[in-house]
Image (cartoon, rainbow, N blue to C red):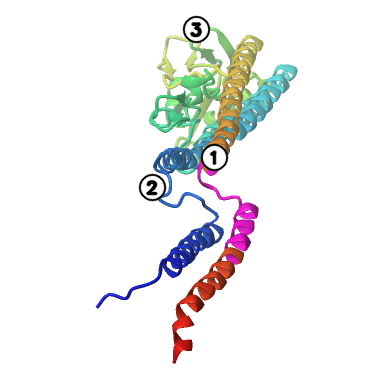
Amino acid sequence: MNIQLSSAVRQNLLSLQSTADMMSKTQNRLATGLKVNSAMDNPSSFFTASALNDRSSDLGNLLDDMGQSIQTLKAADEGIKTITKLVEAAKGKANQALQSSSTADRAKFATEYNELLGQIEQLAKDAGYNGKNLLAGTGNDLDVVFNEDGTSKLGIGAVDYTDVASSLGLADIEGVSANTPGSFTISDADLANNMNTGDTFIIEDGDGNTLIAAGDPGPGGTSFSEYIANEINTAGVPGLSATFTPGMMTGSLTVSYTEGNVSIDDSVTTDDLPKTTSSNFVAGSTSGFETDAQINAALDKLNTALNTLRSQASTFGTNLTVVENRQSFTKSLINTLEEGAGKLTLADTNEEGANLLALQTRQQLSSTSLSFASQADQNVLRLF
């Protein structure tokens, strides 16, 4: 059964329903802060704002990657700064060696120089951040993406300072090593059986130069080994020394010469003592910091390495500036996108608050008007 309403009541009811609907929308805008909550509110504004917010979200994700890239660059920059200090310390060692004439001191400075180069390589290996090391060469190049479709990016090439010989031209300095002396051993029996009274023994170097010549010991019971050893050691020839194993006819004589091979012979051809010559002399290394020219060559390489490090530090510094500026720009762009989306969808809470007060007033008036309209319909009751 249909309920029949008078025209006045129906008109006031529709007004009251319209007011309630508008109040609901206004309250929703106040609750959400948005005047466009769905495509039903305003399709054009809704979809435009959605596109702006989507791009803002994509750029926001890129901001995290930019931040991590900045940290990777900072780690590499700190690594280069420290490597530069170590190279400068190595240069100091080379200068110390240049100012010293002591072979032992130069060998010590060369050892310390090598230790510094080793520390450079270890430091370069430790300069990584989050699995990426711009000082470790192959496989560590860094690509920083600046826009959502990847068409704007910065490629940062890694360098390899984990091997300073190939990257900076700084090879270890070979330490100065001593010669292996030439030496021989001959038995006291051979000396006694082949040397006669008045005979002279002769010690020569590998080039046939006489180092010492002395006569036989004569009577007195001293063994040939002991006598010749005493003569050699008393003569004080640089690098020439001798030891003997005691024992008349059972002992032996050992002679060493640090500057080359050495031999023993006698001065007669009758009952001749066979010439005994060593062949085990090995010359020591004379590379490294042995000469001023070698030290100066090392200093030249160190200066070149310092220039390379400073140039690379400048390159990384430029890259860092670019990434930081793009990070700042992206933050501003995200703010612009979100602000633009907000202008399309955000509600003016002051205006909506005023609207709600007006609608509440209208609702009260509509209720009163509906009451008046219904009273006219109630006049028929007076007839009873």
- Figure label count: 3
- What range is drawn magenta here? 342-360
- Would you name the residue on which mark 1 appears? 67
The reply to whether the magenta stretch includes residue 172 is no
Q: Residue at x 45, y 68 (%)?
A: 13
Measuring from the top left, give residue 147's x and y in whole percent.
45, 30
| Badge 1 element | helix
Q: Nearer the viewer, residue 236 or 161?
A: 161
Picture quadrant where residue 80 is located: top right
Residue wearing tag 2? 39
Amino acid type, residue under disc 3 in the picture: Asp
Q: Residue furthest right?
A: 99
Q: Nearer the viewer, residue 4 or 163?
A: 4
Q: Circle 2: is it few (<14), some (14-19), or many (20+) Cα within 10 Å?
A: few
Compute the Cα span from label 3 to label 1: 73 Å
Instruction: Residue 207: give its label.
Output: 3
